[in-house]
Amino acid sequence: MNGFFAFLRRDVRAALAIAYLALLVLVAVAAPWLSPYSPTAQNVNDMLAQPSAAHWLGTDDLGRDILSRLIHGAPATIYASFLAVGVAILLGVPVGLAAGYFGGWIDDVISRTIDTLLSFPAIVLAIAVTGALGIGLTNGMIAVGIVFAPQLARLARARTLVVRHELYVDAARCFGASTPHILWRHVLPNAIQPVIVQVTLLLAAALLAEASLSFLGLGVQPPHPSWGAMLARAYQAMDIAPEQMYPPGLAILFTALAFNALGESLRIALDPTLKR
Amino acid sequence: MAQGSALAMIGRRLLQAAPVIVLATFIVFGLLKLLPGDVAVTLAGDNATDDRIAEIRRIYGLDRPFLVQYGVWLWKAAHGDLSQSILSGEQVLTSIARCFPHTLLIVVMALGLALLIGVPLGAAAAARPNGLIDRATMTLASIGIAVPNFWLAMILVSLFALRWNIFPATGATAFSVSPADAINHAILPALALAAGGMAEVARQVRGSLLDVMSSQFVRTLRAKGLKTSTILWRHGLKNIAVNLLTVTGLLFNRLLAATVVVEAVFAIPGMGGLIVHAAIQRDFTVVQGVVFAMVIVVILVNLVTDMLCAAIDPRIGR
């Protein structure tokens, strides 16, 4: 824990990113109490209102409070990002560990599959899968997770190739430890660092994928708020109220920036060859 | 590179590509078949008799086992027949042939913009690490990677099309009909797409140039009294050509996927519109066909990139 705070003191960018993300999670959890209005309450007498004391960010084309929708969109965004990345971890890391640890034909088959899936256009597959499984955020993000998995598998495999020849792994084997035990207790903790960095960067990519799917009408469905869905709504009103697109767009941009900044800082902090 | 080895490389890569195409289409085909609801019932419409539904199943081969259906689809696809749309009845290949040029134009223009702006920016940043240009470029690069393309597209439309009327807000013209008009329509979508690509190119160019600039031969050039800018432009860029080419290939594929969403903002009748509408209406032959076409394009681009890399750098020739 002391190391963590030392890291934050050294790296202002990381500290800012973590503070922002912590605030975002807080807002997402406390959304029902924080938001001044219901995110779906329409008011036809107060449509496309400019920011005011009553509506800090104004109202949308159905008279709904934009700040409230922004706050209630945070849980959907966080859920989507973590779901996609969770799927990618659960699929990618074990496969990468297996490929790196067992080698031989298992590695050949897995590596070949990883290489080929890596060039697959993620959002296109997500769209195809959502069409098939039914429109909704969960299906789309599972598809995004499947497409992200090879990236984590490749990283886990590369590190495992190095770690499996370490003395402590040989020692564990000599003591008669089972393969799952060795993989779980000795290989995984030592192969996970590059994966952690990539996971942070993937959270940003998943966030952008969620926004895209919801914008296309394949993710979060109306009247439920999500930042992507809010942009879709703002698109409809673009010729009369172009300023509608800024609050959700900036929210997406800042959150993606925070995830990316954190990932970059972690990469530097965890890389032993980059000692200051 | 000898001609024989080039052909062998193409052959090997095409053989490696076959399983990817099968894997990708199988995944999509499988998922589309698992979906609840019977396509035949939908097609037959209201008040259809059981006989009519059975007849439709037979016509579309929906009464056969799943693997047979997939086998038939794959066999036909391998012969250039992607079947026809369930809803419109149009040949899927015809739809793709109509939509792909729009998408290709935007991707090519975005790629050109990304390289045109990204390479000089990255080189300028590498000339003075931690200088003003470097810091500004890297900040812009972080934003370029984090910004949603379609949101940038909306901002561009609201400013350049709706407020200032410089470019058209929506639609597309076929390049074959009027090249000038087609390019005019494609400028804003290409700009929106290029932002992320520009950032990626600038980052990569800066990174690989810094690697080159700290190498032994550059130290020799410096010792001979050459200026930094001369070393950078004459020797540096030549040495990062392979890296740049690889990035360009990857970027093409990424832009191809990203256009899908940006096209929606501009209502461009490209591959994006095709697959999104098909996905919403569950027109699975079209979805399947678009995925198939996209995977083929991605594989071809990777192949061409590798060939070019091998051609310009003799060390890669295998």
Image (cartoon, coloured by chain):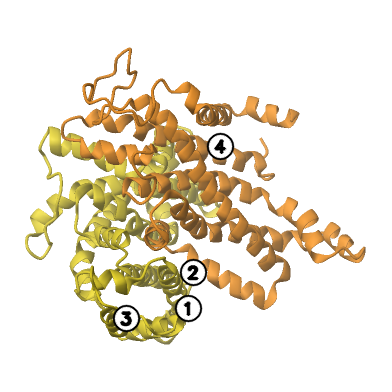
Chain colours: A orange, B yellow
Residue that numbered label 2 is attached to = A116
Front-lying residue, A49 or A109:
A49
Q: Is residue A76 above or below residue A10?
A: below
Foreground disc of the pair 3, 2: 3
In three-dimensional space, the C-alpha distance between marks 4 and 2, rounded to whole angstroms, equals 29 Å
**Residue kind at label 3, given as amino acid type:** Arg
Say the numbered circle drawn on residue B19: 1
- Marks 1 and 2 belong to one chain: no
Badge 2: chain ID:
A
Residue situated in front as seen by the camera: A65 or B4: A65
Residue B291: give x, y in percent of width and height: 35, 68
Q: Do the residues labelled 3 and 1 touch (CB within 8 Å)?
A: no
Q: In the image, residue B236 lies at what x, y percent?
A: 43, 52
| Mark 2, secondary structure of its residue | helix
Cα gap from disc 3 to disc 1, whole angstroms: 29 Å
Q: Are the residues flagged by discs 3 and 1 from a single subunit?
A: yes
Q: Name the residue under label 3.
A: B57
Q: Confirm or deny contact between disc 1 and disc 2 (CB under 8 A).
A: yes
Query: In the image, what residue type sits under mark 1?
Result: Pro
Front-lying residue, A9 or A198: A198
How packed is label 4: few (under 14 Cα within 10 Å), some, or many (20 or more)?
many
Answer with mark 4 or mark 2, whichever residue precedes in sequence. 2
